[in-house]
Amino acid sequence: MMEIRLWVVIGIMAVVIVGLLIKLHSVRKSTREITDAFAKRLVTDTNILIDVAGRDRHVRQLAAELNVQLRKLRELRHRYVQGDVELKNAVTNISHDLRTPLTAIQGYLDLLCQEDLSEDGIRYVEMIKNRTEHMNNLTEELFRYSVLLSEEKELAKKPVVLNAALEESVAGFYAVLTERKIQPEIRMPEEKVVRLLDVSALSRVFSNLLNNALKYSDGDLLIELTKEGEIIFSNRAKELDEVQVGKLFDRFYTVEAARKSTGLGLSIAKTLVEQMEGSIAANYEEGRIKIIIFFPE
């Protein structure tokens, strides 16, 4: 009799254990479904909510709570996107509207320079003219950056010989580089390094990097091109440090050595390089700044 009772107890326990294992398997399956669905919803803009096949009350309650948070997150995302678009449009419009009065001011200053002015008047007009020209340059750079961010058109890619593109860009800056007593040195392989890129965007990237060298170089500039498609701009820059170099790609970030800059040049370069499916980074070692661009085949 005792043996029968023992077997009954063992049988009941076995049934309970099997039931718990089935329940545990169902809960684990449902949590995996929730995890996968939640991860997908975070990276895609969709109205589809999380649904689970299991009937466990607690699991379904978890899914319902996550759906509430997903709705809130989606609403915040839409607000961010809409606000970002409105901000870009506002910046574009403001910078565009500033161009007309600045052009008029420069025109009147040119006329004023033709008048018979005192020595102090000439000095004051020259100061105003310099400040106006500086403001016009900043407005133009801000306008180009806002247009770049708001445009969604694809870049016109075609085979570009990086060797020739680099030489052409440096040649265009050679006069101003030598005027600042910066002697550029170019090292590149004899074989042509060809990549599918947008010519105009690439020229803009090189131009912004050369302008960066004009701001920070202590008198040297080394530009290296490897056959793997890596382009390195490096120069001595004692006025910079590792922290400042790490922020050079941030929008509107400027260091004390470049107060006349908007801080958009390298940010624009980064945007264009990434649009061409390349990468760009900067580091600072032993007093030298290195900006490294890589365009894979």
Image (cartoon, helix red, strand yellow):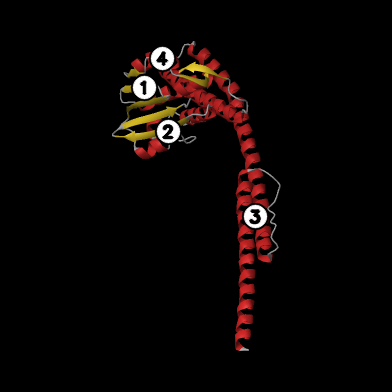
200 versus 72 height, above or below: above
Tell whether label 3 touches label 2 (CB within 8 Å): no
Amino acid carrying mark 3 in the image: Gln
Q: Nearer the viewer, residue 284 or 63?
A: 63
Closer to the chain start, of discs 2 and 3, is 3
Closer to the chain start, of discs 2 and 4, is 4
For mark 2, what is the residue?
A: 281
For mark 3, what is the residue?
A: 69
Amino acid carrying mark 4 in the image: Glu
Tell whether label 1 touches label 3 (CB within 8 Å): no
Amino acid carrying mark 2 in the image: Ala
For mark 1, what is the residue?
A: 223
Please, what secondary structure does the residue beneath circle 2 have? strand
66 versus 273 height, above or below: below
Residue 167 - label: 4
Q: Which residue is drawn at 40% across and 16% down?
A: 170
What is the CA distance from the residue labelled 4 to the residue labelled 1? 10 Å
What is the CA distance from the residue labelled 1 to the residue labelled 2? 15 Å
Please, what secondary structure does the residue beneath circle 3 have? helix
Q: Nearer the viewer, residue 273 or 175?
A: 273
